[in-house]
Image: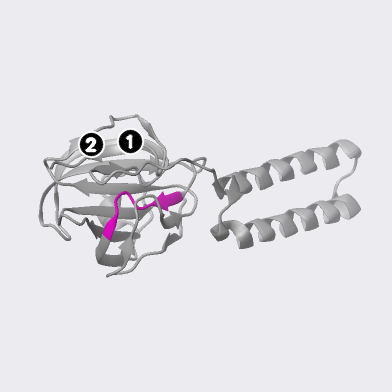
């Protein structure tokens, strides 16, 4: 396991703040050893939570040209046929993954292909499971086209806590399955829009591992 680069500055700022807080507390605020000890314990817990949020575990990634791999760790909260109105403007199979603050928050490219479309939208910060979060929250839309012409759309969505979406792709770029797509800080959601003939391999409530769990299998 290692710490993601998106966390370096936040972890450093947190460490400096907590250290300063406890030093000042020791000198001026805390009346006894018990209070000081409690402050240290709480500070360590807060620091530990921040560090674990930016963790990147070592994994054996799943790679298969017909399989769509989960782009994130989390819980499957939506599997439905819906009309995707931004890019396809036609029915697609939607699979959505909710990422809690305790999940690994690296996002992975679910397939190998070319980035055919990318757009960033500023927006609201509704809770990530809200039905309108897909169209009203801060978000990105990324379309990956496989070698056979099939297109898969991903939407990174900020939640009520997440206030920063990071992406590492651009239109025209070629990406490989399992490489880093981006990062969403502090809780969020990813929607994946698949062809209607794709066979979904997960179920509602199932836990996914980004880069590992098979989300769906594409038709020949």
Image height of 72 relative to 117, above or below:
above
The residue positioned 62% from the left and 48% from the top of the image is 51
Which of the 4 image quarters holds residue 217?
A: top left
In the displayed structure, does residue 143 sit left or right of residue 42?
left
Outermost residue on the left side: it is 90
For residue 76, the mark is 1
The C terminus appears in which quarter of the rendering?
top left
Between 48 and 73, the residue placed more toward the observer is 73
Q: Position of residue 100 (x, y in %)?
A: 46, 41
List the residue tagged with mark 2: 79
Identity of the residue drawn at 84% across and 42% down: 36
State which region is magenta: 106-113
Question: Badge 2: how crowded within 10 Å, few (<14), some, or many (20+)?
Answer: some
* Mark-to-mark CA distance, 2 and 1: 8 Å
Residue name at image x 14 percent, y 41 percent: 219
Circle 2 sits in a helix, a strand or a loop, which is it? strand
Let me know if residue 101 appears in the view.
Answer: yes
């Amino acid at each position: 396991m290692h710490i993601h680069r998106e966390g370096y500055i936040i972890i450093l700022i947190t460490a400096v703040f907590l250290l300063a807080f406890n030093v000042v507390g020791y000198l001026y605020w805390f009346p006894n050893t018990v209070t000081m000890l409690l402050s240290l314990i709480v500070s360590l817990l807060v620091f530990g939570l921040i560090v674990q949020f930016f963790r990147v575990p070592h994994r054996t990634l799943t790679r298969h040209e017909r399989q769509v791999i989960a782009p994130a760790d989390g819980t499957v909260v939506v599997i439905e046929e819906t009309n995707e109105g931004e890019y396809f403007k036609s029915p697609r199979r939607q699979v959505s993954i909710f990422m809690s603050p305790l999940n690994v928050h690296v996002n992975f490219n679910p397939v190998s292909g070319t980035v055919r479309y990318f757009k960033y939208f500023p927006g609201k910060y509704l809770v990530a499971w809200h039905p309108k979060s897909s169209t009203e929250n801060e978000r990105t839309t990324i379309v990956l086209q496989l070698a056979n012409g099939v297109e898969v759309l991903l939407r990174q969505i900020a939640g009520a806590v997440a206030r920063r979406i990071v992406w590492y792709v651009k239109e025209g770029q070629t990406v490989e399955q399992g490489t880093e797509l981006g990062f969403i800080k502090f809780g969020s959601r990813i929607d994946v829009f698949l062809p209607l003939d794709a066979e979904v391999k997960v179920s509602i409530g199932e836990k996914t591992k980004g880069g590992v769990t098979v989300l769906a299998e594409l038709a020949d």
